[in-house]
Image (cartoon, grey):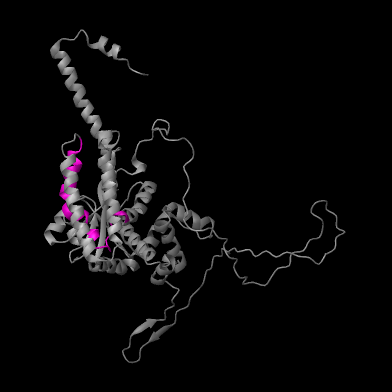
Amino acid sequence: MKIKVADIREEYKDLDKDKLLDEVVDLVLENDKLKRKLKKYENPNTPPSKQGFDKPQAQGLPVGRKPGKVYNHKRTTRPKDIPNTPPLIVTADSNPSNGNTNIVKTGFYIERIITDFKIEKIVTKYIFPEYKDNNTSDIFFAKHPDVPDVGIFGKNVITLANFLHFEHRVTLAGVADLFTNVYDISMSAPTVQELCNRAVEKASPIYTGIGIDIRKSPVANADETGSNQNGKSEWLWGFFAPFLAFFVFNKQRGGDIVEKVLKDFRGILGCDGWSTYRVFSNKRHLLLQRCWAHLIREVKKTCKNVKELDPAYIWTCDMFDEIQRLRKIKSEKIRQRGYGKLIAEMEQWCQIYFVYDGMKEIVNKVKNGKEFWFTCVLHPEVEPTNNLAERGLRKFVVIQKIIGCLRSEQGKRNMQVMLSVFQTWRLQRLNPYTELRAIV
């Protein structure tokens, strides 16, 4: 129902000046409180999943189904597999349209190659003879590569359980149900959890190695996202290189977590505007690359519906286009000149728009970034955005929406280890199932 101005005037016309002032103050305070609350859901850094659920009509958007994924490659038909079984000749005893049995082969035939797989539970009894070393008197048993160190489930079961849970976001109960009803291997959710624990124990050395390799990388990107353990807020930090992904949980969003993970790092760090990265950079005298995707979104949000600020947003996009152009140039001298011009242009941008209402916050953010907005011009191996890190954290964000929260310290340990090894294998274009099976 639309509120009319006349109705509001009628409601307040009999109040004296002091009561009217008190009422105005209360409304202003309430308005500020609602604005702060709304800012959690409407700001440039809020993902679409956490934004409001206004109907498209209310947002002025066209109504209709969202387009699906856009494929940039040319579509092709999948090649048929080569048969690995003897051909089967399919015969008929009657005409399927009328049931007539007076039929004869014409000599003409068609071929169809069908790809399928067979689900078969395999239960194997292994007998391990005992051996004695005549030189040392050591007693030991023979070992088989397909038998895990502990438990009654084979390596394929352990690998698939972890692959489904951590890579494809299937809940523990969902994995247990799949094994019970599809593979005829009776299992419960706690059993799946134990299978995950065993895989994590085997993958831990690889996880440690990834953390060491991240520190040796000439370029890394970092980001963080909210998490919780049984309702208590925590943070998952992600550190990424072109072929590495390393995750670690921390109870704080700030502190010395970056210092601990990247303690020997000597490269260039891509990041957003969080102060923890700036403190780390100042302490270690390292270069940063601030995220242009964040900056463009925030400038767009600030300039939205303010016609006189349209040039500020266009100018920002033009600077980003110039960055992209300079990064493709091989000549270091040309990039150096372009770097100096961009810094001067950014300073001019700040001077012009600092005086506008609503722009001071974003201008101060740009000033705090200093020359770190243009590190990627001098070092083309560094991306101008922090999208590598944001994409890397997205999988956990989806997992947390499904499971609600992590329940234990062991669960946190499992999550950070398996996310790290699986994403690292993906970045290295390795088969994660094959790699995990080789170590369990």
Q: Is residue 225 visible?
A: no
Q: Quadrant of residue 192?
A: bottom left
Q: Quadrant of the C terminus?
A: bottom left
Image-based side of 321 in relation to 142, left or right:
left
In the displayed structure, would residue 335 be above or below residue 400? below
Residue 269 percent coordinates (x, y): 22, 59
Callout count: 0
Q: Quadrant of the N terminus?
A: top left
Q: Which of the pair 254/43 is nearer the observer?
A: 43
Seen from the viewer's position, the closer of residues 364 and 420 is 364
Residue 385, magenta (yes or no): yes
Residue at the extreme top: 14
Residue 355 at x, y percent in the picture: 15, 37
146 sits to left or right of 6: right
The answer to whether residue 321 is visible is yes
Main SS, magenta residues: helix
User: Residue drawn 41% across and 56% down?
Assistant: 165
Q: Quadrant of residue 47?
A: top left
227 vs 405, nearest the viewer = 227
Residue depicted at x 32% and y 57%: 388
Q: Compared to 75, does 140 lie above or below?
A: below
Q: In the shown orientation, is residue 318 left or right of residue 340?
A: right
Q: Return the x and y of residue 63 as percentages of the image width and height.
A: 47, 35
Q: Nearer the viewer, residue 44 or 391?
A: 44
Q: In the rendering, at what x and y percent does residue 33 appear?
A: 22, 30
Residue at screen point 19% across, 26% down: 29
Which contiguous range is marked in magenta?
A: 358-387
